[in-house]
Amino acid sequence: KQWYQRRVAITAGGAGFTGSVLCKVLRATAPELTLTVWEKSRGAGGRQATKRDGEHSCDIGTQYCTHWKNDEFFKPYIKELKSTNVIHELKGNIVNAPNKYGGDCVHYVAKKGMNSTSKYFLSGTNVFYGTRVTALKMLDNKIEVVNAEGRSAIFDAVVFTIPAPQLLDIDMDGRMSHDTSDAISKVKFTPRFSLMAVFEEVPHYDWVMKYHDDEVVRFTVWDNVKRSQGLDPTLLIHSSAPWAVKNTDVKTKEEAGEVMLARLKEVFPELPAPKKVIPHFWRYGQIYKPYPGAPGCVTISENPLVIAGGDSFMNTSNLSMCAQAAEILADRVKEGFNIPNIPMES
């Protein structure tokens, strides 16, 4: 068949949730494609990252997966992750939860860390970590993909699943139109600072997660309790978005962490000093201004095929939308290779 053994690169941030679901969908509906993931980070998950430091670990990005009961699209994904024991229903109290979380939804967490959801969907796919794409070179009907170390590989199609603003840092060999680059420049994310704090022991709290109406601290979660792990008490603190915006490119992540730790002591004066703190900065936290029209994906080059998609191209930012974007990308890949659109089994 003409499309037999086509090589597709899911690249740049390919091991995040959108890229991992895309791999799952294409493995199931277009097994003739050879998939390769290039991920610029050292591990899977993207903004679902789980930080590991010696014996300690903590979700430093997405904290839980929410399934609204009327979301029929996302139900098969939740069912599969539950049946394979990747996720389980959150046990414990969320204090001051946003109004959007009512009785019509269920929150899920992952005992091995939220990035285990991406790892699960990537199973069976070749993934190369620490591989940052810097340029594409068009070779007739194929694409040479070049990484930051100057190494390259040849593919028949390339799919980008990174936050849209990062696409403008990649040399697309003149294939990205002015209209597309102009639209991408309008995509905006809210940044976040996060801080992982590990304690010897702490007082008992009757909550697992708590949202705060505070200038600096927006959210706190006892990660070890959330994941039912018998580890040292580990608190994850997310900054407020306005404070992060104000301090982006002003404070280093270490300086921001010091401010957050001082503020934490004011919010919870009974807490002892932590024995370890690890700060992190998310330049691309959550999408608040998506690509105009929220098409799910955009075509950068028709032949050879280069496309981009993800929550940057959806109306809102959550895991269900990431999965929807993945299916849109999968359909576009199959359309580009004239592959029959075979539905996945539920």
Image: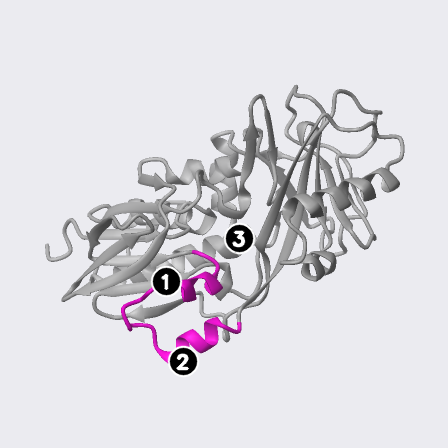
Is 109 left or right of 9, judged from the image as shown? right
Are there few (<14), some (14-19), or many (20+) residues within 10 Å of tag 3? many
Q: Amino acid at mark 3?
A: Ser
Residue 330 visible, this angle? no
Residue lying at the far left of the rendered structure: 1
Pointers 3 and 2 in contact (CB under 8 A)? no
Comparing 60 with 26, the one in front is: 60
Comparing 190 with 254, the one in front is: 254
Residue lying at the far bottom of the rendered structure: 179
In percent of the image, x 49 and y 38: which residue is there?
Answer: 117
Q: Residue 170: horizontal and vertical position, in percent?
A: 37, 62
Q: Earlier in the sequence, mark 3 or mark 2?
A: 2
Pointers 1 and 3 in contact (CB under 8 A)? no
Which stretch appears magenta? 162-186
Please give the residue where the numbered disc 3 appears in the rendered image: 320
In percent of the image, x 49 and y 72: which residue is there?
Answer: 185
Q: Earlier in the sequence, mark 2 or mark 1?
A: 1
State whether residue 75 is above or below residue 330.
above
Are there few (<14), some (14-19), or many (20+) residues within 10 Å of tag 1? some
Eye-nearest disc, 2 or 1: 1
Q: Quadrant of residue 243?
A: bottom right
Please give the residue where the numbered disc 1 appears in the rendered image: 170
Q: Secondary structure at mark 1?
A: loop
Q: Residue 68: horizontal and vertical position, in percent?
A: 62, 51
In percent of the image, x 26 and y 55: which residue is there?
Answer: 145
Q: Is residue 185 magenta?
A: yes
Please give the residue where the numbered disc 2 appears in the rendered image: 179
Comparing 333 with 103, the one in front is: 333
Rounded to the nearest whole Å, what is the CA distance between mark 2 and mark 1? Answer: 16 Å
Eye-nearest disc, 3 or 2: 2
Is 280 left or right of 255, judged from the image as shown? left
Q: Amino acid at mark 1?
A: Ile
